[in-house]
Amino acid sequence: MAADLQNNPEAVFEIKQLPNGEIISVTKIQASGLQEWDFAVQRAIEKSSPLPKSADGKVEAKLVLRFRPKDSN
């Protein structure tokens, strides 16, 4: 799998959540090409429910998040 990461593939997910941050759906809208990576990211998102509210106490109803294995953020 390490060789597959050379191009730093990206998976994109749409997350819908309730006003309390509880995740109600996770939809993969772009596959990375690495099925194991995509599954791991999706499981991590699902286990993160409820997501935290922003500093002003708001929750976005829909989020689109991008994940790359080599992100350094």
Image (cartoon, helix red, strand yellow):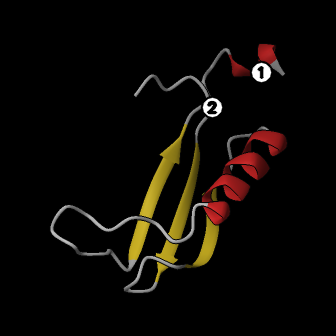
Question: x and y percent of residue 57 in the render?
Answer: 21, 73
Question: x and y percent of residue 18 in the render?
Answer: 44, 86
Horizontally, is 22 left or right of 6 in the view? left
Quick one: 61 or 31, which is closer to the camera? 61
Asked where in the image residue 61 lies, by quadrant, the reply is bottom left
Please name the residue shown 40% across and 83% down the image: 20
Tell me whether circle 1 and circle 2 mark residues in contact (CB < 8 Å): yes
Question: x and y percent of residue 34 in the render?
Answer: 78, 38
Please name the residue shown 51% across and 79% down the image: 22
In this picture, is 49 found above or below 36? below
Quick one: 29 or 41, which is closer to the camera? 41
Please name the residue shown 69% across and 57% down the image: 42
Which quarter of the rendering shows the C terminus?
top left
The crowd level at tag 2 (other Cα within 10 Å; few <14, some 14-19, many 20+) is: some
SS class, disc 2: loop
Horizontally, is 44 left or right of 59 in the view? right
Dot 1 corresponds to which residue?
4
Name which residue type carries label 2: Pro
Name which residue type carries label 1: Asp
Quick one: 19 or 11, which is closer to the camera? 19
Count of marks overlaid on the render: 2
Disc number for residue 19: none
Question: x and y percent of residue 53 in the render?
Answer: 32, 68
Dot 2 corresponds to which residue?
9
SS class, disc 1: helix
Horizontally, is 15 left or right of 58 in the view? right
